[in-house]
Amino acid sequence: IATGDYVGGLSVASSLLSTRGLLRDSDRASALALVAAARLASYRRDPVVLPTLALADANAAVSLDSRCALAIAHKGLALASLGSRAEARETILDALATDLRPELRATLELALHGLDAPLDDFLT
């Protein structure tokens, strides 16, 4: 997904989500966060629709598990890409207060410092 494999990312997450009765809410939240990540990784395909869908996926993930760091992080990136600077800043700060992989933490820190820059600058 990190390399922009939109279809692959959606396929994996869809497979996980189709086993609805077998997954805990936290697992479903992680799968939805992966969908959001895949949409954001393919941002250039449609810089309005994909971040909007990513935001919806991230919101759904956070509603399932409010502690899902991956979902919070991608919600912040989606908000930043849609121009919601204040809400993006708050959400990114919330995500940075959690335990994140170093590469995601670096992306969020860059996004936080560059909310006025185009999303392309920190998604590539």
Image (cartoon, rainbow, N blue to C red):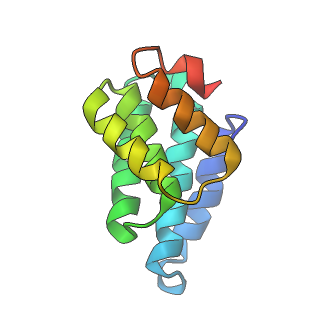
How far across and down, in percent of the image, does residue 23 sit? 53, 81
Q: Quadrant of residue 5?
A: top right
Whether residue 84 can be seen here: no
Q: Quadrant of residue 77?
A: top left
> Residue at the spot x=32%, y=42% of the render?
90
> Residue at the spot x=52%, y=39% of the render?
39
Comparing 102 with 25, the one in front is 102
Q: Quadrant of residue 124?
A: top right
Horizontal arrangement in the rendering, residue 52 relative to residue 113 (left or right): left
The N terminus lies in which quarter of the figure? top right
Q: Residue furthest bottom?
A: 22
> Residue at the spot x=30%, y=27% of the render?
85
Horizontal arrangement in the rendering, residue 7 relative to residue 17 (left or right): right
How far across and down, in percent of the image, does residue 64 sit? 37, 70
Q: Above or below — where is 65 with respect to 61?
A: below
> Residue at the spot x=48%, y=85% of the render?
21
Comparing 32 with 73, the one in front is 73
Whether residue 87 can be seen here: yes
How far across and down, in percent of the image, does residue 108 sit? 53, 37
Q: How many marks?
A: 0
Horizontal arrangement in the rendering, residue 109 relative to residue 89 (left or right): right
